[in-house]
Amino acid sequence: MLRISKLTDYAILMMVELTRDGEMLSAHALAERIHVEGPTASKVLKLLASAGLLESYRGANGGYRVRRTAADISVAEVIAAIEGPIAMTECSVEEGLCSQEDSCDLRSNWQRISLAVAQALRDVSLAEMSAPLGGKANPLQITTLNSG
């Protein structure tokens, strides 16, 4: 099963929350809004700021604010900010990371799959993430919607 990490899930939740009205929020306020622990929120927010997705302001009235609109930020950017380059396998990103590299002929196909997944994630903005399809997600419905 392919899944994003819990930190990445929190990052997407935080980014959606921050893009809702563009207001500046402290790590504490954001943690309360999305129901995560304060240190976890702080860690994720620092990573997002380091990636250039957020601006951070120090001081008593400080906090975090998004740099762009929700429509201009892709899910892929948020994932990459937390997890690094989007890739299905280590060899999809860089040569020399896999001990099987000399005897395996699958690298080009894994790269092809990784590119397709990355493109699909680039095609979904935070604005789209904040407007769900409706009701509970059903993987069969999503597959049907995407294939038709």
Image: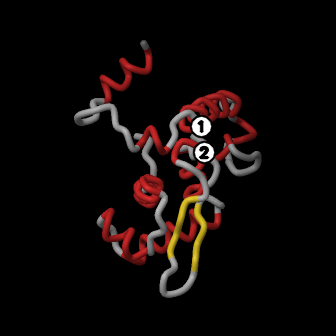
Contact, mark 2 vs mark 1 (Cβ under 8 Å): yes
Residue at horizontal 64 percent and vertical 33 percent from the top: 115
Q: How is the image coloured?
A: secondary structure
Name the residue tied to disc 2.
86
Q: Residue 80: x, y in percent?
A: 60, 52
Residue 134 spot, x, y in % from top left: 27, 33
Task: State which quarter of the image contains the C terminus.
Answer: top left
Label 2, residues with CA under 10 Å away: few <14, some 14-19, many ≥20 = many
* Quadrant of the frame with the N terminus: top left
Q: Nearer the viewer, residue 71 or 121?
A: 71
Q: Quadrant of residue 49?
A: bottom right
**Above or below 144: residue 106:** below
Left or right of residue 57, residue 2 in this image = left
Identity of the residue drawn at 47% across and 74% down: 42
Q: Which mark is residue 118?
A: 1
Residue type pointed to by label 2: Ile
- Percent position of residue 16, x then y: 43, 52
Secondary structure beneath disc 1? helix
Amino acid type for the residue under numbered disc 1: Ala
- How far from the left and from the top, in percent, is residue 78? 55, 52
